[in-house]
Amino acid sequence: MKYALFPLNTVLFPGSILPLKIFEQRYLSLIKDCMKQQSGFVTVLISEGKEVGATPQIYSTGCYVEIIDWESLENGLLGVSIQARYRVRLSNSSVRDDGLLLAEASALRSTLDDNPVLPEAFRPLPETLKQLMHHPFAARYQNAVDFNDTADICYRLSELLPISNKEKQLLLESETTEQMLDQLALHINALQS
């Protein structure tokens, strides 16, 4: 099945919440269709190009998201809040006449889902996340993070750490819990030195 894609200059992880202002016709149509069909779409990081205008180049791993809230804004734009549900791998992409990207999306299983207990070597990670939760950007996650769940800790750290989008994309593409934890530990150590 083909899903509509929403290319962004940010990386979402399962559980991520993001407000969007919608003004391009192709995305207004996308949001309208999703709300009518009670379905979601896929967000994906732009590898080359811009969010507005011509169709950008994208990465092949993104997140399936659902609309959790919407409002009409004073400036006439549509405001929506989306929440990422799970990671997907994209294939067979195409572009509609209006410039909307479409692709087949298959859910990516992760060993994060099978390893709820944080390995002993990574016990400091929840404390790092708790410190990041004091930042205003993390306000939307107050009381919504399970500090006993390895996946939740990894995804929120990946989202909130001040690292580049390319580094976040590599975290999103992690195939194992160990790979993601190792990358996170390296980033945190680099930031603290």
Image (cartoon, rainbow, N blue to C red):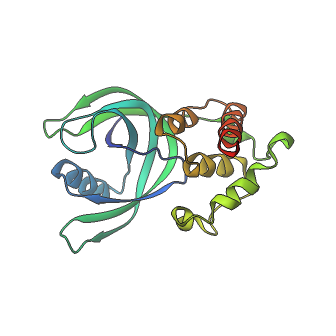
Give residue 131's position: percent from left, percent from top.
68, 60
Quadrant assignment for the N terminus: top left
Residue farthest to the right?
Answer: 120
Query: Residue 57: which quarter of the image?
Result: top left
List x then y, in percent, for residue 51: 28, 44
Q: Farthest front residue?
A: 193
Report the residue that reaches farthest toward the left. 97
Q: Position of residue 135 (x, y in %)?
A: 58, 64
Judge whether 73 appears above or below 112 on screen. Answer: below
* Residue at x-position 50% and y-position 35%: 169
Q: Of residues 148 and 124, which is closer to you in this image?
A: 124
Q: Tell me what residue is drawn at x 51 percent, y 50 percent.
A: 85
Of 125 and 80, which appears nearest the observer?
A: 125
Q: Residue at x 19, y 47 (%)?
A: 26
- Give the camera-side residue of 8 and 81: 8
Q: Left or right: where does residue 120 sit relative to residue 100?
A: right
| Quadrant in the picture for the C terminus | top right
Residue drawn where x is 56% and y is 62% of the image:
138
Task: Give residue 112's position: percent from left, percent from top.
Answer: 68, 40
Callout count: 0
Q: Reply above or below: 11 against 146.
A: above
Residue at the outermost bottom position: 74
Determine whether, in the image, residue 3 is placed left or right of residue 168: left
Q: Nearer the viewer, residue 12 or 34?
A: 12
Residue 29 located left or right of residue 20? left
When the figure is inspected, residue 176 is found, relative to residue 13, above or below; the finding is above
